[in-house]
Amino acid sequence: MSFMMKAMLGSKLKDMTGGGGGGEVEVPAGDVKETPESKGMSREEFEDYQRQLIEEKMERDKEFATKKAERANLRSCLRDKYRLPESGQDEAMVKMAGDDLDLPEDLAKMVDEDEEEEAVNDSLLGQLHQLQNMDMDQLKTKAQTTMTEIQQVAEEKCVVM
């Protein structure tokens, strides 16, 4: 507990009291500079090591941005599929990534199948096919019921009939 208190309040108390103590200068842990000697390398090896670290970081950042854009692309496709409002943030992410995006194969198949199904259903042949699948007797009774209901309502409202 005292360690936690010292860690949290130690530097603030030192600043308030004037820091009284030895002449040692404390360097925060994040401000320590790496040197070739601290890594046990020659200067050339250390420079290569630093360059390699920077390249790896840039590669990781690029892969992260690509994955983020692919997810945005996926969300955008799902929004299109289910006719939801578009997100400007996702659109911007997709534009930033450019043409490097891949749509998962499963989703691409689903979207294509749905588009084909909608195209067939929207066509005249699709409508005829739906009519063939309906039960004609049920359709006939429903039409007759509707007509009798309309007649009854008309008779109640109209005195002439």
Image (cartoon, grey):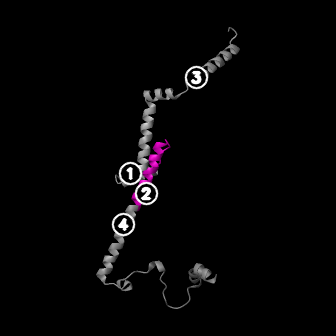
According to the picture, the residue beneath numbered tag 2 turns out to be 68
Tell me the quarter of the picture where residue 116 sits.
top left
| Comparing labels 2 and 3, the label whose residue is closer to the camera | 3
Q: Amino acid at mark 1?
A: Lys
Q: Looking at the picture, does residue 35 appear above or below residue 125?
A: below
Q: CA distance from mark 4 to mark 2?
A: 15 Å
Q: Amino acid at mark 4?
A: Met
Q: Which mark is residue 137?
A: 3
Q: CA distance from mark 2 to mark 3?
A: 55 Å
The answer to whether 2 appears left or right of 104 in the picture is right
Q: Looking at the picture, does residue 120 appear above or below residue 109?
A: above
Q: CA distance from mark 1 to mark 2?
A: 12 Å
Dot 1 falls on a residue whose secondary structure is helix
Q: Amino acid at mark 3?
A: Asp
Residue 102 locus on image (x, y percent): 38, 52
Tell me the quarter of the picture where residue 112 sits.
top left
The stretch of residues the image draws in magenta is 64-87
The answer to whether 112 appears left or right of 19 in the picture is left
Depth order, front residue of 144/46: 144
| Comparing labels 1 and 2, the label whose residue is closer to the camera | 2
Question: Marks 3 and 1: CB-CB under 8 Å?
Answer: no
Chain-order first, disc 4 or disc 3: 4
Q: Amino acid at mark 2?
A: Lys
Residue 11 locus on image (x, y percent): 56, 81
Question: Marks 4 and 2: CB-CB under 8 Å?
Answer: no
Depth order, front residue of 95/103: 103
Q: Which mark is residue 58?
A: 4
Q: Residues within 10 Å of mark 3 (few under 14, many from 20)?
A: few
| Comparing labels 4 and 3, the label whose residue is closer to the camera | 3
